[in-house]
Amino acid sequence: MFTASILAKKTNLPIYTVRHYTRIGLLQPIKNSQNGYKEYRPSDATRLKFIVAAKDLGFTLAEINHILAQAETGNSPCPSVRKIIVHHIEENKRKIKELQNLQKKMEKALTDWQQLQNSVPNGDSICYLIESVGEN
């Protein structure tokens, strides 16, 4: 059994990460009745490493909580994990496409702006460069 600070050191994570995951229920230490400290088991280090790995793959804390809950009931979380990652991949592809379209729009705007004169706000216009984008 060890404290949050020792768990943080063992997993190379900041103490506030351990405390946050404890606060939201991803980690569930045992409270020492003698000193009131929260004590973590070696299995909590394994659990914490799993949480970090899942976060690195893009899983949200809510999704991780769901996966952990499934595992605790003795059911394989693997089907859910596959379903979640497929959803994330599809969402990432959509976001990448949006970003590529935005990049093209920005590059076109910059090209167009190279030919425009600078202007000062006049009550009808704030920045003609940005306002000109809607005119194209």
Image: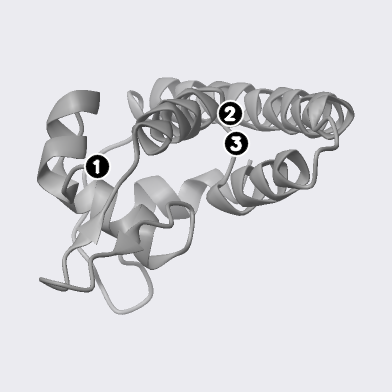
Q: CA distance from mark 1 to mark 3?
A: 28 Å
The residue that label 3 is drawn on is 59
Query: Which residue carries the number 2 mark?
Result: 99
Q: Quadrant of the C terminus?
A: top right
Q: Position of residue 88 (x, y in %)?
A: 72, 31
Q: Nearer the viewer, residue 41 or 17?
A: 41
Upstream in sequence: badge 1 or badge 3: 1
- Mark 3, secondary structure of its residue: loop
For the residue pair 4 and 99, the one nearer the viewer reads as 4
In percent of width and height, residue 38 lies at 24, 61
Using the image as rendered, state which of residue 80 and residue 135 is in the foreground: 80
Query: Do the residues bearing badges 3 and 2 touch, measured as CB atoms within 8 Å?
Result: no
Q: Residues within 10 Å of mark 2 (few under 14, many from 20)?
A: few
Dot 1 lies on which element? Answer: loop
Amino acid type of the residue tagged 1 in the rendering: Met
Between the residue at mark 3 and the residue at mark 2, the CA separation in whole angstroms equals 21 Å
- Image colouring: one colour
Q: Is residue 92 left or right of residue 1?
A: right
Q: Which residue is mark 1?
A: 1
Secondary structure at numbered mark 2: helix
